[in-house]
Image: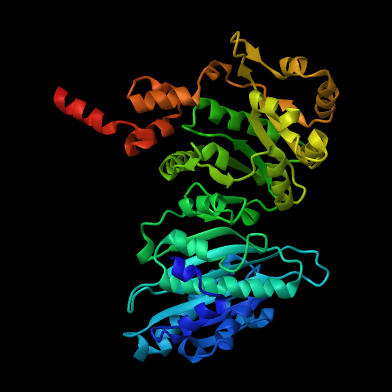
Amino acid sequence: MDEFRKLTTQEKALRINLSRAIYGSFAEIGAGQEVAANFFKVGGASGTVAKTMSAYDMKFSDAIYGVGDRYVCEERLIRMLDHEYVLLPERLPHLIETTRFFAFADTVEALNYERTNQGHGWMGMRFQLHTESEPNDCVLHLKMHDTDPLQQQYALGIVGVNMIYSCMFLNDPEEILMSLLDGLTPRRIEIDLFRLDGPDFKHVDNRVLALKLVKNGLTKAAMFGPDGNVMQPSDELYKKNVLVLRGRFRPPTHVNVDMLLASRRHFKHESDVDRANIVLVSELTLNDLNSDGKIDEKDFLHRADILCSLGQNVLISNYFEYYRLVDYLSKITKGKKIAITMGIYALQKVFEEKTYEKTRGGILECFASLFGSNVKLYIYPALKKDSGELFTLKDFEAELPDNLKNLFRFLMDNNKLEEITGANVRNLHIISDNVLAMIRKGESGWEKFVPHKVEEAIKEFGLFDYPFKQEIRQVSVEK
């Protein structure tokens, strides 16, 4: 892998051109013409390029790929790959036995003349790893952060060459992922969706690749749905009323579920919320996935499997501070109301001034981001650690330092904070860490602390080191 990483964009393009077993087509819409250009500039392009085209005009694009509502979207990209790939074996039957075909496509919106938009695009590759085999798909969504359109196009060309090279010469999915930004930095190009599918990648769980996007700094947030398919956050959450529950979910308990359902009941009755437009999101931060400084991918998948079984959209983020998460979501939702559900002890941390010591404006600057947009926090009660009595917002206010009481009252008076009423306080004694310990030790009784679907998933798949094999042996002995 180190040898591959040392190659420049030009060297990668040349190696592909000189490999007579690799042959394909390029179709680029919008600002993406730089990818094919790299292969022509280094020489020997006749060994790689069967066809290159740019259906820049919408009417021409529609005539080739079909009419669509949007041109820079995954659906358009897949249509392009569908159309272009089948033409290769159809028109080049004499090369089928000796050639690994590929179709590369991108559809991109670069920075406009007024510089008022976010440059972004979809890029994909349908490719064979072996001659006469069924093809695989590699798809990504990227955001371009250069402030000059020409620099954006140049960077896009680099990513395209990296994609084609890595798909053709690398086998490890993480190596393919990490090679995409060779010669670039995440400050210039951000990749917030990456997917590998096909006969040669049946072993790949794209949820793990979503985690690696965030873990390796290629993006700050990635997302997948209840079916486990990775999603592009800006598409899924665009102009939606988003309700987020952050947690460790290790495992999800009755408390986690009640937090989400109870806050949704409140959220639905907000005057500026469209009930049909609500998206529920369970968020996992890298901090919550870390164990001794490392991320356990097996443990992550256990949590992901259970959240998916509960029908949840899952967001993985590197936004430890809530105000950063809100700032990220606000840019996507475009002014639509956002709600964050948190326990009252989490609210204590939000009000700790030391959290904001490294911020120039301190707590006021960060609260401006957290509460300045159309955002509301729903606060779930807890039991007091010393007495076991109910800990509510009234108690919280009484314990605040005097210098923060007026700030708290301001937020309450302006409908920025709301206590969740109707919470199932009978379950407040349930602690996820205690349930996890019971599961791992094989102790009975943990089942009553989690939803039935969670219990079923843990037992069926042996999640969280559940000793299901031991249970089977015991049953056999009893028989």
At x 52% / y 17%, what residue is drawn?
429
Q: Decide if residue 437 is on the left or right side of residue 231.
A: left
In the rendered view, tell whether residue 169 sits above or below residue 37. Answer: above
| Residue placed most toward the observer, 314 or 289 | 289
| Residue placed most toward the observer, 201 or 64 | 201
Quarter of the figure with residue 363: top right
At x 61% / y 45%, what residue is drawn?
318
| Residue placed most toward the observer, 100 or 311 | 100
Q: Taking the image as drawn, is residue 447 in sight?
A: no
Q: Decide if residue 285 is on the left or right side of residue 242.
A: left
* Residue 51 position within the rendered picture, expressed as x and y whole percent measured from the top left: 52, 87
Quarter of the picture containing the N terminus is bottom left
* Residue 53 position within the rendered picture, expressed as x and y whole percent measured from the top left: 59, 85
Describe the colour scheme in one phrase: rainbow
Quarter of the picture containing the C terminus is top left
Quarter of the figure with residue 186: bottom right
In the rendered view, tell whether residue 39 sits above or below residue 459. Answer: below
At x 76% / y 35%, what residue is drawn?
357
In the rendered view, tell whether residue 17 sits above or below residue 430. Answer: below
* Residue 48 position within the rendered picture, expressed as x and y whole percent measured from the top left: 47, 86
Q: Taking the image as drawn, is residue 124 in sight?
A: yes
At x 69% / y 35%, what residue is drawn?
267
Count numbered badges in the picture. Answer: 0
* Residue 233 position within the rendered picture, expressed as x and y whole percent measured from the top left: 62, 53
